[in-house]
Amino acid sequence: MANVTRVPLGYNSAYLIEAAGRRLLVDTGPDFRGAAGAIESLLHGNLPDLALATHGHLDHAGLGRHWQERGVPVALGADDLHLVNRPGLSDPLEFRGFQEFIESSGAPPGPQGELLAGIEQRREWALRAAANGPYPPPPSDRRWPSGLRYRSFVPDVLIATDGRALDGFPALVLRAPGHTPGNLVVAVPEEGWLFSGDQLLPAITPTPAIQRQPRIADGVDWRFHSLPAFVASLRRLEKLRFQRCFPGHGEPFDNVDEVIRTNLAQAEQRAARVLAVLKESGPATVFGLCEAIYPRAVQRRAWQIVATVQGHLDLLEAEGRASCVGGLYSAAL
């Protein structure tokens, strides 16, 4: 019999699984002011035997260095190593990849300049978050009591094998790429539990991201096509028929199959909308599709809309329903 304790950390939730005298912390927690102390207080000073980050984003792996300094080993998906061992966008090839993506998106000079400036701001922010200085001010949405820091670290355990059993724990770690290249979920088969990180959330449907491959080099496509991988991971999890899900944000829930189906339906609806515009208007750039489908939103949230449309184009292309030649997307004949 396993026990689970939810650890609320602002907008995030981490979980302590206790079984057979062992303690597994799922997600390290975000590094905001007071977060580490709050976790240890809730754990009554009993440190976990292992902390596993479901993926390398700062709100799920931000306290990785903290746990290592406390003598707790930290595990991560091998294909997310690039997210934790250096500040974001500090790799010149990665930064250039983002620039070239924006320049080839079809955005006119004004929006293109804003998108390029936004990438530069993201790089500067990542460098500040990686510094071991004072905590930044709270974000405007107040998701955490302060801004987040993200000190780089090298995980003690890199997980590259699907279905890996953790020594001493009645849990299986499943690779679920999509949200990030090395995204993981944790299953406790005996209980029918799924610890989903950001792979499955109770009130949020998938929004793909523009992100890099784990390993990039000159002359190789640098971009990880996240949405096709995300959808494939959801379809695989659907077959496992979990009874209860413990997400990285929000409250645990029982209608796991229903939430998975909702996510898959949302992805298909958005992809179908993109395909319908391609069939009606003919070949189009990514930004041209953004303006056709989300004319108001793209003016306010250009990067999010570009990422959403590109993700669904990736899905259509992976399924053979669309193709891209010279930066122009067309519906398949």
Image (tube, rainbow, N blue to C red):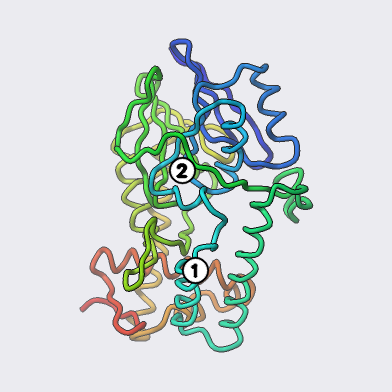
Q: Can you tell which quarter of the image residue 76 is in?
A: top left
Judged left or right of residue 37, residue 194 is: left
- Tell me residue 122's x, y (percent): 62, 64
The front one of 202 and 317 is: 317
Q: Can you tell which quarter of the image residue 258 is in?
A: top left
- Tell me residue 35's x, y (percent): 70, 35
The front one of 127 and 111 is: 127
Q: In the structure shown, which secondary structural element does the residue marked by tag 1 occupy?
A: helix
Location of the N terminus (image quadrant): top left
Q: Residue at x 65, y 42 (%)?
A: 11
Instruction: Return the disc, 1 or 2, that comes first in the chain's sequence.
Output: 1
* 88 in relation to 69, above or below: below
Q: In the structure shown, which secondary structural element does the residue marked by tag 2 occupy?
A: loop
- Tell me residue 201's x, y (percent): 51, 43
Location of the C terminus (image quadrant): bottom left
Judged left or right of residue 76, residue 34 is: right
Judged left or right of residue 8, residue 90 is: left
- Tell me residue 325's x, y (percent): 29, 82
Q: Which is more foreground, mark 1 or mark 2?
A: 1
Distance from disc 1 to disc 2, alpha carbons, whole Å, reads 32 Å
Which dot marks residue 92? 1
How many marks overall? 2
Q: Residue furthest left?
A: 333
Q: Amino acid at mark 2?
A: Leu
Q: Amino acid at mark 1?
A: Pro
The front one of 273 and 301 is: 301
* 243 in relation to 221, above or below: above
Residue on which the image places disc 2: 200
* 282 in relation to 176, above or below: below
For label 2, count other residues whose C-alpha is less than 10 Å away and answer few (under 14), some (14-19) or many (20+): many
Q: Residue at x 61, y 27 (%)?
A: 70
Judged left or right of residue 149, residue 173 is: left
